[in-house]
């Protein structure tokens, strides 16, 4: 489920920008080209890294987009005038981004500023000597807002941008990963079986789920309901302290959740529930039966009473006129309006030792803003590129909105809820052609995204979706992952499924752990902790 949501994130966010257009604040006015963005530190005289104030720097810039950018696009020209730069934007199709970059790098074409889309590529480009080191003092001096706001949201974030102790990129963070996957109950079912308190402990979960099966919660006179399906099994694993496919800290080291002894206890619970008919027998195929990935058809159609499928915003009620990101809520509303109005949002189950944990993204998504190796020989140009990134993405909410949506009053404006909405039928394609929609800057600080998604963020926080999450603490690919990872994950899936369904006894877990370690897992543990030790320095 987590992998699926990651693949879908870009499409979801793009849809949310246009359909929901959520935010708070105003856009700054166009300024003159002084060469020094306001709010950034002015270097002392004689500083060799200082950008020359009487020079217009030409910066080659590559992000990857679906629409070619007009070099004279209105948003491009706005920032060129404001920051005294000349952008050379490379039009690289996002669908073939890595392939095109690899070819350009191989032929010696390296842009001044480049978006690197994953950890593996980031490490590869550093090893290929394509990217410039970003000295920490320069980063703090010329991109102080990006540095400070990123570190505030995710302490030690820049440690993850290091290779051999040197910083080579500015990490980007994902606002939505402030919150874990949802815990959604059919509130009308809870009432119908006599439960007035939202379940919190594992025992309370079990009581409610058994009642959902045995006490006709939908009052149709048939025994045709189940407690949960695939997604909510993660809540049960979390009640024992781990997520099976996440790496978690334990005694100062990283351990793989799937082989921890506590998972044997979790599997025993799920095996019992499956034998007792509490788990939907169709759980193997998942809750989604086609179409938009985040829809839990099993829940929407009244087959199960608990789900954690999708992201929180798929389940929230409509918060303002024009809000349409609540896909699952809206589908429930179509099928059963009363049920939609009585949805209950709870916390993950608290286990026997007080553990709880729903899957939650790391916020650090492996995407980096980096700079071409050639800028190491032009420190003043590197400083200018850092200043430009800081001005557009870090300096103010006003600048952020301008970079994303264009000119206030012409391309967008605030509605009566102080949320930015696009004007004059502007769409993503037009914004990209003009140089907006993250073309010039792909850093979306959670602070600004939270302001733009103000009502959604407030709703998620009020429903405690920022409490009780478990994050994967391994944030980089391991050297041996390509060799062992696929087979080890397959072994885990097959073993867990066989134990839950009763095809293998609970004791098969111990044999699985041995096979996992001897089949490459021990090597992955070694590499994971070598990486973790380097990050922790």
Image (spheres, grey):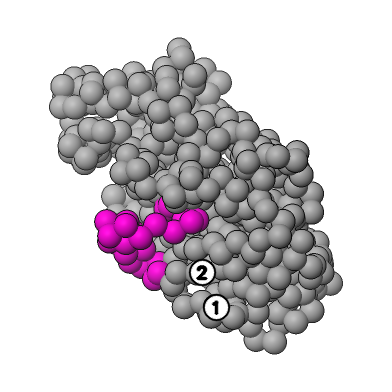
Does residue 426 sit above or below 274 in this rendering?
Answer: below
Q: Is residue 475 above or below residue 83?
A: above
Magenta residue check for 108? yes
The magenta span reads 92-117
Secondary element at image label 2: strand
Callout 2: 10 Å neighbours few (<14), some, many (20+)? Answer: some
| Residue extending furthest toward the bottom | 424
Residue 35, image x, y percentages = 72, 59
Q: Residue at x 30, y 25 (%)?
A: 527
Q: Quadrant of residue 533?
A: top left
Instruction: Give the crowd class for mark 1: few <14, some 14-19, many >=20 residues within 10 Å.
Output: some
Q: Which mark is residue 71?
A: 1
Relative to 177, 290 lies left or right: left
**Residue 54 in the image: x percent, y percent?**
71, 60
Residue at 27% over, 60% down = 107
Tag 1 and tag 2, C-beta contact below 8 Å: yes
Q: In the picture provided, is 112 more to the left or to the right than 245?
A: right
Q: Nearer the viewer, residue 240 or 210?
A: 240
Give the residue pinned by disc 2.
Answer: 88
């Amino acid at each position: 489920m987590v992998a699926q949501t990651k693949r879908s994130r870009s499409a979801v966010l793009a849809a949310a920008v246009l359909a929901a257009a959520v935010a708070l604040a105003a856009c700054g006015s166009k300024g003159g080209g002084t060469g020094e963005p306001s709010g950034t530190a002015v270097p002392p005289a004689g500083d060799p890294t200082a950008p020359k104030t009487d020079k217009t720097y030409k910066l080659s810039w590559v992000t990857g987009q679906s629409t070619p950018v007009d070099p004279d696009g209105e948003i491009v020209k706005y920032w060129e005038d404001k920051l005294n730069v000349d952008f050379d934007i490379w039009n690289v199709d996002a669908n073939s981004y890595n392939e095109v970059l690899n070819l350009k790098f191989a032929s010696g074409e390296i842009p001044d500023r480049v978006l690197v889309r994953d950890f593996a590529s980031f490490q590869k480009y550093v090893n290929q000597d394509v990217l410039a080191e970003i000295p920490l003092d320069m980063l703090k001096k010329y991109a102080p807002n990006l540095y400070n706001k990123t570190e505030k949201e995710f302490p030690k974030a820049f440690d993850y941008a290091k290779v051999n102790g040197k910083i080579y990129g500015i990490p980007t963070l994902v606002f939505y990963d402030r919150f874990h996957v949802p815990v959604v109950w059919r509130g009308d079912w809870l009432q119908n079986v006599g439960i007035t308190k939202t379940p919190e402990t594992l025992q309370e979960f079990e009581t409610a789920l058994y009642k959902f099966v045995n006490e006709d919660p939908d009052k149709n006179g048939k025994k045709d309901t189940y407690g949960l399906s695939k997604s909510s099994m993660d809540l049960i694993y979390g009640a024992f302290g781990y997520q099976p496919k996440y790496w978690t800290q334990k005694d100062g080291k990283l351990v793989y959740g799937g082989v921890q002894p506590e998972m044997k206890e979790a599997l025993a619970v799920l095996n019992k529930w499956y034998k007792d008919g509490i788990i939907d027998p169709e759980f193997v195929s998942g809750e989604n039966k086609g179409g938009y990935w985040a829809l839990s058809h099993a829940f929407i159609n009244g087959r199960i009473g608990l789900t954690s499928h999708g992201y929180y915003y798929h389940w929230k009620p409509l918060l303002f006129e024009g809000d349409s990101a609540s896909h699952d809520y809206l589908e429930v509303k179509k099928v059963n309006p009363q049920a939609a109005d009585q949805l209950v949002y709870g916390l993950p189950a608290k286990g026997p030792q007080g553990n709880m944990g729903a899957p939650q993204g790391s916020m650090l998504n492996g995407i980096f803003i980096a700079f071409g190796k050639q800028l190491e020989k032009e420190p003043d140009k590197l400083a200018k590129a850092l200043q430009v990134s800081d001005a557009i993405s870090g300096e103010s909410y006003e600048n952020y909105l301008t970079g994303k949506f264009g000119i206030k009053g012409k391309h967008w404006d605030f509605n009566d809820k102080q949320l930015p909405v696009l004007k004059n039928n502007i769409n993503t394609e037009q914004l990209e052609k003009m140089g907006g929609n993250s073309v010039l800057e792909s850093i979306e600080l959670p602070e600004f995204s939270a302001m733009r998604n103000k009502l959604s963020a407030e709703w998620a926080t009020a429903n405690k979706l920022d409490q009780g999450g478990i994050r994967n603490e391994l944030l980089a690919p391991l050297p041996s992952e390509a060799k062992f990872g696929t087979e080890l994950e397959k072994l885990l899936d097959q073993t867990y499924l066989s134990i839950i369904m009763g095809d293998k006894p609970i004791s098969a877990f111990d044999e699985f752990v041995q096979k996992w370690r001897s089949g490459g897992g021990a090597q992955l543990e070694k590499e994971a902790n070598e990486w973790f030790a380097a990050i922790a320095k």
